[in-house]
Image (tube, helix red, strand yellow):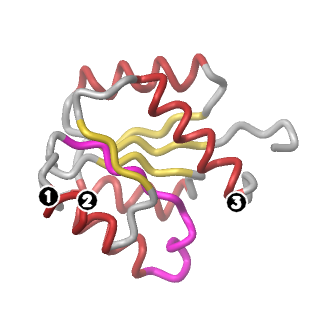
Amino acid sequence: MDGAKARILICDDDPLLLELMEFRLKAKGYEVVKAVDGAEALEKVRRDAPDVVVLDAMMPKADGLEVLARIKGDPALSEIPVVMLTARKGEKDIVSALDKGADDYLVKPFIPEELLARLARLIARKGGKR
């Protein structure tokens, strides 16, 4: 990626999960931006132009599916890959997220190394372009 760090926006209302993910991602050399609710996630995705967004489905102010739909519905943001990381594991939830444009879907509890591998794949596919 030309020596530039990929920027990952993590959106979750669980402070422990945010801390764990930030630690793991920074250890892999990523730049991390955090948001604790849907409104903050939308603000930061517009302001910080992340390379990938990791999004919880159940958050205050705007849920993850609404945030996903707004990201994918905005021509300036729609190319940003979005990974849903959520406790919702029903077929309807998964299909709904994929229909709204999610690039990947992981169910909590998750394997941190699996998330890292999926993020690396999406960043490589995107080509690290900002």
Question: How packed is label 3: few (under 14 Cα within 10 Å), some, or many (20 or more)?
Answer: few
Looking at marks 3 and 1 on the same chain, the residue that comes earlier in the sequence is marked by 1
Question: How packed is label 2: few (under 14 Cα within 10 Å), some, or many (20 or more)?
Answer: some
Nearest to viewer (mark 2 / mark 3)? 3
Q: Which mark is residue 125?
A: none
Residue type (three-letter) at the residue carrying disc 3: Arg
- Give the CA separation, mark 3 to mark 1: 27 Å
User: Which residue in the protein does label 3 denote?
Assistant: 130
For the point 73% across and 52% down, the residue is: 128
- Give the CA separation, mark 2 to mark 3: 22 Å
Circle 3 SS class: loop
Is residue 98 positioned above or below 3 on the image?
Answer: below
Pointer 1 with pointer 2, Cβ within 8 A = yes
Looking at marks 2 and 3 on the same chain, the residue that comes earlier in the sequence is marked by 2
Q: Which mark is residue 39?
A: 2
Circle 2 SS class: helix
Residue type (three-letter) at the residue carrying disc 1: Lys
Magenta extent: 74-86
Is residue 66 positioned above or below 127 on the image?
Answer: below
**Residue 98 screen position, x and y as percent:** 33, 66
Is residue 22 positioned above or below 97 on the image?
Answer: above
Circle 1 SS class: loop
User: Which residue in the protein does label 1 denote?
Assistant: 61
